[in-house]
């Protein structure tokens, strides 16, 4: 935090240690004849017959796959070295807007690794997986309470999978009402995340964009104009990707509901409102929850996550299977005697069916359930409060000094857990783009905010600090941005050429797109 | 205050003052009508030891593969994942970052993706690999979606040898694409080539099979490819990545898209997830691939580096025109996959595959030698096979479970009364012999009780 | 491996990222009111009484200990950051002579963490700790076979603890023969590790130094001259700290044995000879084994380790208690029915007693036993072969070029698993000391060899690559030394000022000794 | 070739050629008489999965604190160590390096030692702390050794309240120092001050007590210090580090050297080790301290840094004149200690201590209310207490074990027939109540069988 980025190096002629490493792949480390694993003998009575006697030669591989031949120490060193070429949440502030990069409690990893979880086969008979089913059921109940909607499916593997599920539910709902053919359009605001329109297309719908008004909310006139009997669904994020809670939310949902559409809530920003406001109470039918955002599942460099959905009564019949059912014990023995069952399409004939194999990303459920147990109801509400406090405090710090001058708020309203600045001033007055500021932040050992999203903001910087950052770390971020801007007033070239201290410097992405090399050439 | 946050009361006051408001409430610009004016109806937070105890108690109520001898499969398998996989993927540098949007500080993850792609491309014999999708069955749906884009057709012909969960998932997705799904049956355990030829037509976007198939049989992909390609359809094969270590590659056999469940590659069983799905294809599909793909490039100083490549396929750039909607995928699981493959190595993968073939054929012999047990087919198998019998499957499984054995996955009505039995390197010959013994007991008892029932009835 | 240390930095004015961090302690991060742990309520019936009612106020603390007040994310970030300021075995070659820095298999960590090991209370009744006792017994048998001596105590916590044990055993042995008073001297060669003489003193003996002959072995004349009825014991390392196997070993041990002394083998270098030669067969009575060297226990930044001892029949009666005994089952049932018991001083009245609490560093035993199971007898022998091969290959590489010129072998004989170079040539001809070469190696991202030991070698560099290094890594090390020497020919100042790229540069150790600040001042 | 090495046959040949020899044998310059000319009589190496299975099987034959309710103590306690301790100490950067001889690349470990020293100094109220020794009992011997150097006397007066294992260890070591060891008894559970005063003389190097003592009683250190200091002896106290969170500090009470077992601070039980010993002392002892000590300094550019300080005390520099022979210590365990203390924090340590006091007093009341159970003393206790009864301890423990409870540690002949019962925050009131129930059953049965035996005999 007390990094002094501008101090001179100890001596010239000394490259940053990381930059000395040429990236060498595990394949390039391979030496024929090396290996790590020791595979036991088959040991079948009568000894080993030739494989060709068991499988016709025509079905066998002509050449072994050219996997690396490396010893265990080499594997450990190789991937340890790679790991050090990553910035992570434990390196410093990671205010990647819309991603809720909150601390990942190590307890959650511990409980997920218990053999009763980690080595439980997904085809185990429900009667012998009661702990897992009870855990899933309990998580469902907690999410239901948090979302304000009665029914849950944990099945979707991520937010976008939840979106697709929601749209397929919408389709099934309209089909059930005989309206599948005419309801072809899905409304999404222009602030929507890219997965929303992409999911709409995959679900066979047409995207209709709704404008954002000057206060950063849904433009009600535009919404009304576009809401008709062709509308299948409205997809909305609230607070939206600008970090703003839509003041007209009740009216928005009522409008679409009256027109016969379903209401889909993109829960990526749930971390702002847990225990304070519930999508169900806002009038939504379907909500996805990103367990890897609000519920502390580590992001893993791009997953795994999970995107459970919560739905209203009218959507419930169509929920994906399998579903979990709690069956009260007959013995009058109360809770202790309850059983948990998996129900499939036979019991739920109107279900849209499966979205994937087995029961979903159970390991993620374990972590998120541990997180909910750790925080409890009050703790979740407080987490949201602190997330909002931290964002607003950081914003207050960034309205001072040069950030206030060159990086104004895109929409001048009180944000919740994140806020979006526009770098258009910096670009115009300093000749430094949002990308340059982001890259220069890397030299400060900080992860940049989300950049160039939402699309409607010019040179957007989307900042979400989360509740687990300390005040010192927020101050450090504000100070870093201030010093970058001050430096740019003097010499914008510094930011334009940044970063300098990272394992590699700016990469030729255009070249990679023109001439994609996406696997190693093994000769 | 939970131990995960740090704002003290004093700091809260100071921060509110800096913001210029009096209370936290003032920050919640939420209309009264949609404010929750009560506490969440959830239990109070617990200390770490208490949460651990609670979850340990739940975990202890599951019969896992450490407490039972597990012959379950059908897509996920109880392979031994070496300790170094866990050790590496639990390093916070891999565990905690997000998608590598800032490549300069994400070279570790990006390079691992590139290595993963190389390994999957080697396994499948296809030139393109994405960095990983969610899991097995949904990759089948993703491949089918690609086929629509590639062929502009909307009909899939799916073999009954494809895992029922994959077929169900495809059907769910196809309601949206929209597309039609047709089934063709098996003959001798493998896709019936005549029915297939009859079912494939000019409207067919893709033929979809599994390799080895749901009943464990190794399909003749080359023959199937011929049928598909003749009609201008793509061939999609859902593959077991371990079996690909010894089987003729999909690429060599003419498959256009090879997908599958990545769990067998060093991932935990985890009651079904998280794992990863892989997705490989021919060069022709490069602009239609779903998911992240890492590509090699150089930095301004000429250093080798990696970036997310071909991003113009993706939702964050192309939005409604994206080739797929996936965003958060399963990067950490795919990382586990490449580490596992590096550990197995060129020789280990073959040795493992051969071990599986030998023990699986042995197990099939042993089990089908039991009175009343019939093989469902006698096609060659790699690691899994199906047996039929006419005792109630649930009863048989219960008997085996009482002896500490999870004997197999029920086949389901489509394939008749029986079990799918899976072998891994952790299933020793002794365990297989024991399974045979216990299964034979179970069937004997079932037969007895049938006789008794018959006696009582008679 | 392909590091290019001399390439110019990407841009001036950019310090190595690590060096920007001022070291901040966890205490300095503390903010009153923060915290990580949630301690539950006592929950005793009747509610909480004041502590003063249970413990008199005069026995209570006046002020809470000023431990840090920090949240969990801060702890994780703090120690993650600290970890990155360490070089480790997974960073690159670590040829620290005498320390056997071999790869630490991750499997061993996994099995040590099993609850049946990690959460087994040491006071558990032996009947309910049979798995642990069997494991210890099995490890004892394996070590006995490897050392060629019949009896084992696993109790010592490290090598030096084993040495002390050996000397106390020697004392008990001589007392048993009525010779405790006259046998007051312990012979150690001048190449001995510092713990040897230090242990001698702690055991109440006097150190008598034996000279090293011109071939690097024990000077037989000096040994004979000093061997008389006052000798209690000879302590020897073989191969010794020069990496040389003493050709006269049989004669050496016979000499001391005839004079009535015990023979102690310092097993720090066992990694050279596993399966090839055994201390018992050489004539030793007592051997310590460093499980953290030859048997892959991770070094942990300075422990934990374990220093089991193997002894001959004549020493056995005095072994520390508790001892493990395998009791055959009465049922004629064979091995299956055996029980394992802990035996104490009552059963072993001539025992020297305990050396520590409970049963020793059991967690270390688990790891080393897993290692022995993984390698098997052949694998251990092969590990030693490869350790010796790697050392000799590296030496061959280092006899070429400048290393051969400036850093000759201290004793020109074929070494085993390690070798000692003398930097006196480099000092004289280049003005660069061994310390400078070591520090410059840090800029090459390599751990230096052990330096300035053994003491009899001027400017010593003691190099032990171990069997788990690849040939590429050995070549990389040889190349790095070559390039450092070449650079020093041009400009010795570069090495004298090195390192440049480490988190801190050369530290003022003299100042720290003069004015020791060994705890934080909390005001 | 094991997977831990990488030299292939081809490489071996090339390397031998580079060395200039024909075979590996040529490198083994070992006289024929001491060469082992057979293979080691050990089993062949196993694959990772097989080793894992073997060790899992052994582990499953131990009744650990996860499978039993554990009231065992006597130096090591079943506290909950938060997951972050394991997560951090298993980072290879902490796990795999050796002693920080090269401080420039060991700042992480060195700073952690410095922080550890600060925390231990805070806990004990003494200005000096080493970076950690092996474990508890041997630190008592190390402190005694220091006392010889400091006082030039060779006699120790040891309270019977010191853990028997510590006394035994001291006696073992004292044979070498050499020194004489004298015991003084207890009165009302605490060191008998009159006997102590009688035993301490001009030859006494140190008085050694435990705090709280073996029977759980909190000693009056200040009173003991007076006796010791009057005779010019040092006072050494073996302390429970958790209890120090609420008890008057050794420093404030006049203790010269506070040592102890560090396991309760975030370390595993591990059937007794590895853990660490701590060693704190007054300023006067700075040049006599045993073990590594980290010190603060600056680098050539003025940056703050840490080094091994006061190395002239140590064996690698001073050899036979070193203050102690320790080299490899327990650095990783001490790191676990400072992480645990940071997690507990200023408030948590006090809360934990108070919880222990309350539950322990409750448990003592509950258990001594059982018919036939007597407290061994009624001195104040923090986390452990001793009870006596006249049934055979082994039988009582077996009965409790059959009910899933490890009821306590047998006191041993010196303190009479009974148990030492330890409480941690993991032992709930419900578990304590259950212990009382099961113990009372056990004693009832024992009484019955005594009566029966009496009946049969009469
Ligand atoms: C607003 C918003 N919606 C949807 C998504 C998609 O969620 P996921 O990445 O889990 O598929 C994201 C996250 O990346 C998001 O930020
Ligand atoms: C030759 C030699 N002897 C003895 C020792 C002492 O062993 P330990 O550090 O385990 O006490 C060492 C290691 O440091 C050593 O290298």
Image (cartoon, coloured by chain):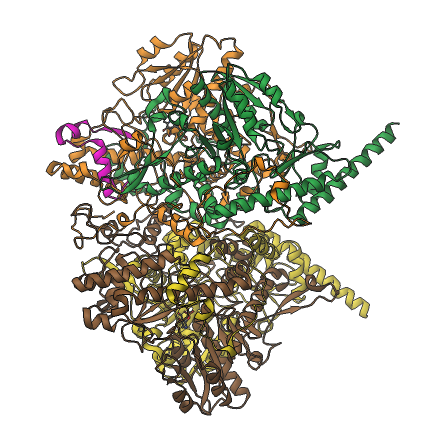
Chain colours: A brown, B yellow, C orange, D green
x, y percentage for residue B39? 56, 68
Pinpoint residue B85: horizontal percent, then vertical percent: 42, 52
Percent of width and height locating residue D378: 68, 34
Image-based side of A203 in relation to A134, left or right: left
Chief SS of the magenta region: helix
* Residue B224 vertical placement versus B433 (above, below): below
**Nearer the observer, C374 or C122:** C122
* Horizontal relation, residue A261 to residue A516: left or right: right
Find the magenta span and give its range: C419-446
Relative depth, front residue between B133 and C431: C431
- Toward the right, the furthest residue is D458
Residue D394 vertical position relative to residue B350 in the rendered view, above or below:
above
Examine the structure image and report whether residue A131 is included in the region drawn in magenta: no
Q: Quadrant of residue A238?
A: bottom left
Say if residue B413 shows up in the picture.
yes
Asked if residue D135 shows in the view, the reply is: no
Query: Quadrant location of ligand 1?
Result: bottom left
User: As drawn, is A42 to the left or to the right of A313?
Assistant: left
Picture coordinates of residue B201 (x, y %)? 42, 84
* Quadrant occupied by the C terminus of chain C: top left
Q: Residue furthest left?
A: C490
**Could you say which is closer to the camera, residue A157 or residue A434?**
A434
Q: Is residue A22 above or below residue C254?
A: below
Total numbered circles: 0
Magenta stretch containing residue C426, yes or no? yes
């Amino acid at each position: 935090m007390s990094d002094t980025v501008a101090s001179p190096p100890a001596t010239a002629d000394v490259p940053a240690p990381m930059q000395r490493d040429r990236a060498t792949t595990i394949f390039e480390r391979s030496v024929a004849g090396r290996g790590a694993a020791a595979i036991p003998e088959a040991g079948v009575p009568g000894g080993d017959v030739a494989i060709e006697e068991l499988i016709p030669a025509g079905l066998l591989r002509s050449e072994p796959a050219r996997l690396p031949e490396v010893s265990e120490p080499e594997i450990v060193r190789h991937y340890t070295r790679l790991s050090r070429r990553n910035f992570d949440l434990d390196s410093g502030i990671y205010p990647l807007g819309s991603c809720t990069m909150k601390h990942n409690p190590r307890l959650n990893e511990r409980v997920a690794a218990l053999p009763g979880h980690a080595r439980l086969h997904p085809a185990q008979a429900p009667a012998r997986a009661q702990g897992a089913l009870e855990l899933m059921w309990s998580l469902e109940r907690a999410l239901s309470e948090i979302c304000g909607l009665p029914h849950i499916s944990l099945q979707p593997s991520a937010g976008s999978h939840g979106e697709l599920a929601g749209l397929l539910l919408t389709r099934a709902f309209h089909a059930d009402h005989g309206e599948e053919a005419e309801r072809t359009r899905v409304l999404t605001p222009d602030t929507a995340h890219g997965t929303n329109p992409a999911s709409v297309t995959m679900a066979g719908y047409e995207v209709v964009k709704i404008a954002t008004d000057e206060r950063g909310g849904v433009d009600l006139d535009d919404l009304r104009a576009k809401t008709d009997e062709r509308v299948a669904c409205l997809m909305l994020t609230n607070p939206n990707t600008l970090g703003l809670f839509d003041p007209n939310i009740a009216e928005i949902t009522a409008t679409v509901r009256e027109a016969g559409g379903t209401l889909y809530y993109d829960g990526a920003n749930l971390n702002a409102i847990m225990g304070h406001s519930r999508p169900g109470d806002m009038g939504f039918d379907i909500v996805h929850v990103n367990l890897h955002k609000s519920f502390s599942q580590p992001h893993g460099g791009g997953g795994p996550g999970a995107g459970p959905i919560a739905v209203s009564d009218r959507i419930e019949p169509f929920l994906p299977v399998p579903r979990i059912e709690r069956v009260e014990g007959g013995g009058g023995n109360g809770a202790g005697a309850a059983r948990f069952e998996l129900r499939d399409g036979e019991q739920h004939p109107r279900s849209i069916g499966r979205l994937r194999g087995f029961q979903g990303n159970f390991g993620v459920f374990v972590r998120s359930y541990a997180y909910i147990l750790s925080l409890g109801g009050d703790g979740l509400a407080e987490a949201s409060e602190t997330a909002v406090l931290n964002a607003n405090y950081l914003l207050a710090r960034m309205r001072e000094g040069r950030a206030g001058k060159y990086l104004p708020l895109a929409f001048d309203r009180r944000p919740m857990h994140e806020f979006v600045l526009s770098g258009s001033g910096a670009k115009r007055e300093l000749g430094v783009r949002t990308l340059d500021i982001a890259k220069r932040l890397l030299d400060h050992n900080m992860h940049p905010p989300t950049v160039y999203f939402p699309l409607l903001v010019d040179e957007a910087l989307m900042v979400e600090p989360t509740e687990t950052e300390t005040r010192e770390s927020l101050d450090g971020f504000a100070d870093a941005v201030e010093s970058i801007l001050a430096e740019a007033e003097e010499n914008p070239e510094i930011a334009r050429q940044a970063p300098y201290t990272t394992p590699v410097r700016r990469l030729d992405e255009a070249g990679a797109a023109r001439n994609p090399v996406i696997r190693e050439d093994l000769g | 205050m939970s131990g995960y946050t740090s704002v003290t009361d004093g700091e809260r006051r100071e921060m509110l003052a800096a913001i210029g408001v009096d209370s936290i409430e003032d920050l919640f610009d939420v209309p009264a009508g949609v404010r929750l004016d009560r506490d969440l109806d959830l239990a109070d937070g617990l200390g770490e030891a208490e949460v651990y105890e609670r979850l340990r108690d739940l975990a202890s109520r599951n019969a896992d593969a450490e407490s039972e001898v597990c012959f379950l499969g059908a897509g996920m398998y109880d392979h031994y994942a070496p300790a170094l996989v866990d050790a590496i993927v639990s390093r916070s540098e891999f565990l905690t970052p997000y998608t590598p949007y800032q490549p300069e500080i994400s070279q570790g993850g990006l390079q691992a993706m590139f290595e993963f792609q190389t390994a999957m491309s080697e396994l499948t014999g296809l030139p393109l690999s994405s960095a990983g999708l969610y899991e097995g069955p949904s990759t089948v749906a993703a491949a089918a979606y690609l086929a629509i884009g590639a062929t502009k057709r909307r009909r899939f012909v799916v073999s009954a040898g494809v895992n029922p969960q994959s077929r169900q998932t495809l059907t769910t997705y196809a309601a949206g694409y929209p597309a039609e799904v047709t089934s063709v049956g098996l003959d001798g355990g493998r896709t019936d080539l005549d029915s297939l030829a009859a079912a494939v037509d000019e409207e067919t976007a893709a033929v979809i099979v599994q390799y080895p198939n749901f009943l464990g049989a190794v399909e003749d992909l080359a023959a199937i490819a011929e049928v598909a390609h003749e009609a201008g359809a793509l061939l999609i094969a859902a593959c077991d990545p371990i079996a690909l270590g010894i089987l003729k590659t999909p690429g060599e056999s003419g498959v256009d898209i090879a997908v599958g469940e990545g769990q067998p590659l060093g991932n935990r069983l985890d009651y079904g997830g998280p794992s990863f799905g892989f997705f490989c294809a021919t060069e022709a599909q490069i602009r239609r691939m779903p998911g992240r793909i890492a590509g090699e490039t150089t930095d301004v100083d000429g250093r080798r580096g990696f970036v997310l490549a071909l991003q113009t396929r993706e939702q964050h750039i192309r939005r409604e025109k994206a080739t797929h909607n996936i965003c958060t995928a399963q990067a950490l699981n795919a990382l586990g996959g490449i580490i596992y493959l590096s550990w197995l190595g060129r020789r280990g993968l073959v040795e493992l595959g051969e071990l599986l073939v030998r023990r699986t054929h042995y197990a099939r012999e042993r089990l089908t030698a039991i009175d009343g047990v019939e093989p469902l087919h006698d096609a060659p198998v790699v690691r899994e096979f199906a047996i039929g019998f006419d005792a109630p499957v649930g009863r048989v499984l219960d008997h085996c479970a009482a002896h500490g054995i999870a004997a197999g996955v029920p086949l389901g009505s489509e394939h008749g009364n029986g079990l799918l039995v899976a072998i891994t390197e952790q299933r020793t010959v002794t365990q297989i012999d024991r399974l045979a013994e216990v299964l034979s007991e179970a069937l004997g008892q079932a037969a007895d009780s049938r006789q008794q029932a018959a006696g009582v009835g008679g």
